[in-house]
Image (cartoon, grey):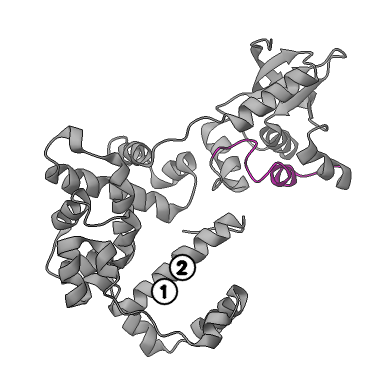
Amino acid sequence: MLDAGSLRSIPVREIVLDTENPRIRKWLEMYKDPTPEQIYLALGSGSDDESESSTTFEKLKQSIITNGGVILPVIINKTSDGRMVCIEGNTRVAIYQDFLAQRKPGNWESIPALVHDNLDRGGIEAVRLQVHLVPPRGWEPYAKAKYLSHLRDVEHLPFDRIMDFAGGRQKEVYESINAFADMERYYRDVVPDDGSFDTKKFSGFVELQKPGIKESILAAGFGMRDFAKWIFEEKIYPLNTVRMLPRILKNEEAKKVFLKDGARKAATVLERPDLSKTLMEADAVQIARALNIKILKLPFAEMQSLKQDPGGESTQELVQAYENLRDLLEQLGLTPTAV
């Protein structure tokens, strides 16, 4: 049976990285002294130290600096010959060691650690499996947004500090906080009681923050309370069909169907774009290359036209393309830094 270990503060100079970890071994073989970022990448771009796949190495470093250290202890195996081997938290240890070498202001001499004495191979694998196969449960999006809203509106923390806590993209954090405010103000007003307040509908209010959505609702003569009622009555289902509202509300026939039977049926009324066979048969890279050229050569007048009609069909097609491309890049692990 695995012992509970003891919580200690361990000098980082005494800690050695886990050279037997198969994810990090190749980097230790390729580089005599791999950088903390190389170790982080070897460990799966954050899976060793963070449950959020969107957390980047730079954000992990910034979080450590902001908090003056790590919050969760690393896990150490003290071997029979006295070596302190880090079996979980290699990136955090490497960052501490790097800060120490650079003489970065702060206390980086020691790191909180849960120390086990002389674990055998089975014990080491048990620790790894528990950390990676049974990770901490992530916050429900509504609960996370509520907390972020509290930090901004009650604690009055600067937004850059909130970002250090939250991680992810700045735009998404803004959307999450604003979505929480809209849901509390409008959705709570239309549900008959607290028992009917479904926090799973939160993603619909996140979609509401996308460019052109609110404008299209207002332009069609409706308001945010109408939107909340559509969500409650499941006129908008699935919730990602919020993205289609600009097109639905501009089309009289589609709007009538939507108000009677919901967004899914209204979508069938909308005209489908006439795409040529050549365009449909092109692969994603060819289309991306063509889109890049088109954007670079986009006439100023056309750009202004798109800007002046954020809820228009053309603008919304671009927004949808952006969302889909961003999701694809995230799946490929190539997410660019976004604001």
Judged from the image, the secondary structure of the residue bearing numbered disc 2 is helix
Residue at image position (60%, 76%) is: 283
Judged from the image, the secondary structure of the residue bearing numbered disc 1 is helix
Q: Residue flagged by tag 1: what amino acid is it?
A: Leu
Specify the segment rendered in magenta.
32-51
Q: Is residue 119 above or below residue 185?
A: above
Q: Is residue 183 above or below residue 266?
A: above
Is disc 1 surrounded by few (<14), some (14 to 19) or many (20+) residues within 10 Å? few
Which mark, by number, is residue 220?
A: none
- Viewed as shown, does residue 157 lie left or right of 45? left
- Viewed as shown, does residue 1 lie left or right of 307? right
> Is 162 or 209 nearer to us in this picture?
209
Q: Residue 207's spot in the image, x, y percent?
A: 33, 57
The answer to which quarter of the image holds residue 14 is top right
Residue 147 part of the magenta segment: no
Separation of disc 1 and disc 2 at Cα?
A: 6 Å
- Viewed as shown, does residue 251 lie left or right of 15? left
Q: Is residue 69 above or below residue 246?
A: above
Mark 1 touching mark 2, by CB under 8 A? yes
The answer to which quarter of the image holds residue 241 is bottom left
Residue at which label 2 appears: 322
Residue at image position (17%, 42%) is: 188
Residue at image position (76%, 44%) is: 35
The answer to which quarter of the image holds residue 245 is bottom left
The quarter of the rendered structure image containing the N terminus is top right
> Is 18 or 203 nearer to us in this picture?
203
Is disc 2 surrounded by few (<14), some (14 to 19) or many (20+) residues within 10 Å? few
Residue at which label 1 appears: 318
Residue at image position (72%, 36%) is: 94
